[in-house]
Image (cartoon, rainbow, N blue to C red):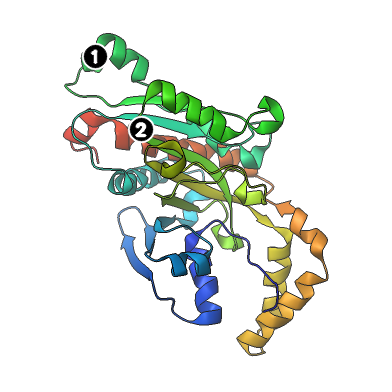
Amino acid sequence: MGNFQVRTDLALEARESVNRTEGELRGVRVEEYYREQEDVKVTKVMIDTKNAAKAMGKPVGTYVTMEAPAMVEPDEDYHREISECLAKELLEILPPREGEQSVLVVGLGNREVTADSLGPQAVDNLLITRHIVKEYGAAAYNCDRMNLVSALEPGVMAKTGMETAEIVKGVVKETSPDALIVIDALAARSIRRLNRTIQITNTGIQPGSGVGNHRNALTEESLGVPVVAIGIPTVVDAATIVSDALEKMLEGRERADAAEYVGRQELNFPELNNMYMTGKDIDAVIKRVSFTVSEGINIALEVHGQEEGHI
């Protein structure tokens, strides 16, 4: 396949790409199930070894992918169901807790770039409770227990002159949260997963990785607290679109031969690696899916809601 590299932030797609060229990979476990009530397919990719992590290009950890083809549709009831499904998966991947928990939610991205504004827009709709609970206690929400939720929108280095990791480290040091939830836009390998897929992982995140602009990572190792990352693919690079088109044109050939041919063609158009594509209705889509993500986090962290059986 030459030097051709499939650019994707989704572990599910990285696994599919590796399996296509090398067969089943040792050190990677996969669980798939379908949440019929929410009409969501869930795939858990668990990378257990360093060799598997190197082959996949992803850190060791758990990656949960929720595929909901109708997520881009303006159906508020269905988006609520996705939010509830997200809350269930998020609670399973967050560290176990006893009593109240302090959680810092970080919305990564550039608010002025629509396809990159998932994080900031999701933060806008969060139920922020830390300041109220610290001042008045959980009784202010008419319940016995309430998680302390705070939020941060660090912006981008071009505006602040600081690495996102530097800003987050400072806030973590001052506020001492029990866990971080980081939200960011991702890049997909497949157009059919664009804006229709949610990935949750306990490995943290590397800001800017979706567009190849790697910054310092936000991980448990670098911050000292567990980091759960939530992302939705909002862009694909132009080389991916060209590759998909070429592979479809070459459907009659052997798959390996077609992939090798595609790899050679991609090398002839390196300028495509700096171009990223998104849908024409991305502004409306981001508004909907960011609210879906924020509602999922709200449901997961609202302790009195869990006790009443809302999840």
Q: Residue at x 62, y 85 (%)?
A: 256
Residue 188: where, in percent of width, then height? 59, 58
Q: Seen in the image, is 141 located left or right of residue 265?
A: left
Q: Seen in the image, is 58 located left or right of residue 115?
A: left
Looking at this view, is 36 or 91 the one in front? 91
Q: Residue at x 20, y 24 (%)?
A: 145
Going by the numbered disc 1, the residue's amino acid type is Gly
Residue 263: where, in percent of width, then height? 72, 75
Residue 301: where, in percent of width, then height? 31, 33
Q: Quadrant of residue 236?
A: bottom right
Q: Quadrant of residue 208?
A: top right
Going by the numbered disc 2, the residue's amino acid type is Asn
Q: Residue at x 35, y 20 (%)?
A: 129
The residue to which callout 1 is attached is: 137
Looking at the image, residue 161 lies above or below residue 250: above
Q: Seen in the image, is 301 located left or right of residue 257?
A: left
Please report contact status of discs 1 and 2: CB closer than 8 Å, yes or no.
Answer: no
Mark carried by residue 298: 2
Farthest residue, direction top: 135
- In space, the residues marked 1 and 2 are separated at their CA atoms by 18 Å
Instruction: Report the mark closest to the observer, 1 or 2.
Output: 1
Mark 1 burial class by Cα count in 10 Å: few <14, some 14-19, many 20+? some
N-term-proximal mark, 1 vs 2: 1
Q: Quadrant of residue 255?
A: bottom right
Residue 253: where, in percent of width, then height? 67, 89
Q: Quadrant of the N terminus?
A: bottom right
